[in-house]
Amino acid sequence: MELKSLAGIGFETLYDAFAKAFADYEVRIDGPQLQKMLRRRGFVPELSFAAFEGEQITAFTLNGIGNYDGVPTAYDTGTGTLEAYRGQGLATRIFEHSIPYLKKAGIGRYLLEVLQHNAKAVSVYRKLGFEVTREFNYFSQETARIDLPAKVPDFPYSVRRIDIAEHDTIPGFWDFRPSWQNSPESVERASGDLVSLGVFDGDTLAGYCVFEPSSGDVTQIGVDRRRRRQGIGSALLREMAGLSRSGILKVVNTDTGCEAITRLLENRNIPVRGKQFEMIKTL
């Protein structure tokens, strides 16, 4: 078994290994969806690694590279092992193999997210030196089942597309720092796949969202703290539900300590479906 980087490996080979590794998962990702995911998360093949048996990928870790909180960071975009090769510790070997290359590239830490109920994976990451930094909720619902009342915000408003980079008030709407895949850097990388909407009171931005219509993924949603409980969040959800081509809305990686977003989504019948740990290891 040879461990080496994914530099020069064609996308079809990569997708074939990805599809086989996650064939037993309930949710499947097709080729275009994987390409969008890799683009958004900053995938760098030269700093991603796999185990090969001949020309076949048997296990892999796809790393995104970027700045997170001002620190050059590697992010686990996807780790998988083909079923016939599980139980051999390949994921751990690939991770340990990658560390010298990441350090040489100036990467200061490694970031990942893991489902809280996956106790085996959490245990492995702890043994590798990862520490839990945050806990996240995952929400989803079919658009037809979302409770979207006819009530509109109780002020004259308009909804229009925006470029979030042009609105420096937006970070002030946040109750928590967006996760890697929802960060401003990820939004910029995937700008062609995303739609950003703003709710305006006259010329003043009162709330906004960033959304991927093809998947129904709500990347960011925020409301001016002074304008909350006026129907702005519900108006944004209504707009996104109408634009979703997947028939669902999903909100991934909201901080479990943020009562405002939890209350908004649960009141609209978008329930928590799962929880994740954010974990970081200093390299």
Image (tube, rainbow, N blue to C red):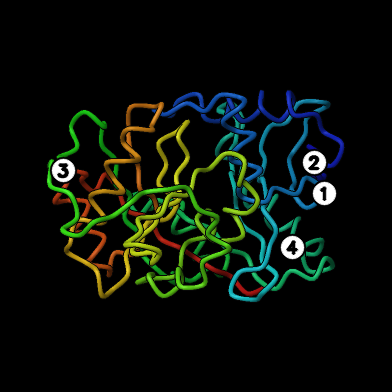
Of labels 1 and 4, earlier in sequence is: 1
For residue 99, which numbered disc appears in the image? 4
Query: Which is more toward the observer, 5 or 64?
Result: 64
Q: Which residue is mark 1?
A: 46
Please indicate whether residue 221 sits to the left or right of residue 94 in the image.
Answer: left
Q: Quadrant of residue 260?
A: bottom left
| Residue 148 point in image, percent of width and height | 17, 41
Q: Which residue is mark 2?
A: 6
Q: Amino acid at mark 3?
A: Asn
Q: Are marks 2 and 1 in contact (CB under 8 Å)?
A: yes
Callout 2 secondary element:
loop
Callout 4 secondary element:
helix
Please indicate whether residue 204 sits to the left or right of residue 47 in the image.
Answer: left
**C-alpha span from label 2 to label 1:** 6 Å
| Residue 187 point in image, percent of width and height | 57, 53
At horizontal 24% and vertical 56% (from top left) the residue drawn is 156
